[in-house]
Amino acid sequence: MKLRHVFSTPDLATAELAMEAARTGGVNDDDILLVARSDIEVESIPDERKEADTDLMPAAARGAGYGAGAGLLAGLVAVAIPPLGVTLAGAAATTVAGAVVGCWASALVGSSLPDPIRRNFHDEIEAGNILVVVDASKDTLTAIEPRIVAAGATTLPYETSKTMS
């Protein structure tokens, strides 16, 4: 399992030094991303370095679960009311329909939310700093963190697991 740590740098040159420190410490190039104010990202940061996460997938999964639960409940209530004539197959259909609608609606909302790093460090980003995001094992992060700090970066209080990597 990889962990995600975030470092703040005052400019692109320092961010590049921090990225090089991470690379020489054994971090894969694909596991190093940059987050900056939009004007800085457009002008200076290559697309493959940009962090573009949103809350889309977690929101879609939550929506599917809640929607399926609501659909199942509605289907079972409909089965319990004999004049409606709903069968267990109908209850299953309402469960699936609820999951689809819940997933769709939640995904729409989730796609509009910025990623947690942008939410947590909004002021840091707006001040013009460039954030270096590193995904690596705990041992690797422990080893490279002093190198990244020596390159001019500041460690920010952020650690989360990155299980999808």
Image (tube, rainbow, N blue to C red):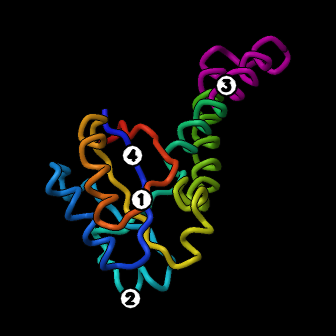
Secondary structure, mark 4, is strand
Q: Give the residue type at disc 3.
A: Gly
Residue farthest front in this picture: 150
Q: Position of residue 66 (x, y in %)?
A: 66, 31
Q: CA distance from mark 2 to mark 1?
A: 21 Å
Residue highlighted by disc 3: 69
Label 4–label 2 contact, CB within 8 A: no
Q: Position of residue 99 (x, y in %)?
A: 59, 35
Q: Give the residue type at disc 4.
A: Arg
Q: Which of the 4 image quarters holds residue 163?
A: top left
Taking the magenta stretch, the answer to whether it contains residue 140 is no
- The one nearer the camera, 119 or 62, is 119
Taking the magenta stretch, the answer to whether it contains residue 75 is yes
Residue highlighted by disc 1: 7
Residue highlighted by disc 4: 4
Marks 4, 1: nearer the viewer: 1
Q: Give the magenta-colored segment's residue range.
A: 68-93
Secondary structure, mark 2, is helix
- The one nearer the camera, 45 or 129, is 129
Q: Earlier in the sequence, mark 1 or mark 3?
A: 1
Label 1–label 3 contact, CB within 8 A: no
Q: CA distance from mark 4 to mark 2?
A: 25 Å
Marks 2, 3: nearer the viewer: 2
**Mark 2 crowdedness (10 Å alpha carbons): few <14, some 14-19, many ≥20:** few
**Mark 3 crowdedness (10 Å alpha carbons): few <14, some 14-19, many ≥20:** some
Label 4–label 1 contact, CB within 8 A: no
Q: CA distance from mark 3 to mark 4?
A: 33 Å
Q: Earlier in the sequence, mark 2 or mark 1?
A: 1
Q: Earlier in the sequence, mark 3 or mark 4?
A: 4
